[in-house]
Amino acid sequence: MPKERTKQIPEQLYVNIIKFFLLEITNPDIEAAIRKGLHEKLEADMRRDLYTKYKTAPTKEQQEAARQKYLDCVGMRESFRWS
């Protein structure tokens, strides 16, 4: 069985999750902060995964396809990209 991967999150997000789930503090601001923080973490994980695929692709074609997906994900304009 493969070892379970771990993820790091900012301390404030961790505190907000504890407040919301363990202390049952139902504040709309805390809930919004949790949603925003988890969304940002998910986006960062997706960008990292695309970058890793770009760097470890076995062929030049797969590497270029992964690079283009990564650049699309980070929002780099076509006109600003190198060939």
Image (spheres, grey):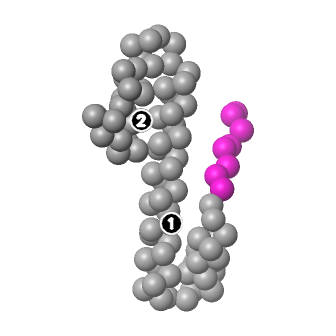
Specify few, some or many for label 1: CA neighbours under 10 Å numbering under 14, 14-19, or 20 or more: some
- Residue at the location (46% across, 78% down)? 31
Overall secondary structure of the magenta stretch?
Answer: loop
Query: Which callout, 2 or 1, points at the residue further toward the start of the chain?
Result: 1
> In the rendering, at what x and y percent does residue 41 appear?
52, 56
Which label sits on residue 70?
Answer: 2
Using the image as rendered, state which of residue 39 and residue 1 is in the foreground. Answer: 39
The residue under label 1 is 37
Residue extent of the magenta highlight: 1-8
Whether residue 72 appears in this view of the structure is: no
In the picture, the quarter occupied by the C terminus is top left
The answer to whether residue 42 is above or below residue 83 is below
The amino acid on which the numbered mark 2 sits, given as a three-letter code, is Tyr
State the residue lying farthest toward the top: 59
Q: Which amino acid lies under the numbered mark 1 shown in the image of this protein?
A: Gly
Find residue 38 and report its horizontal and vertical position in percent: 50, 62
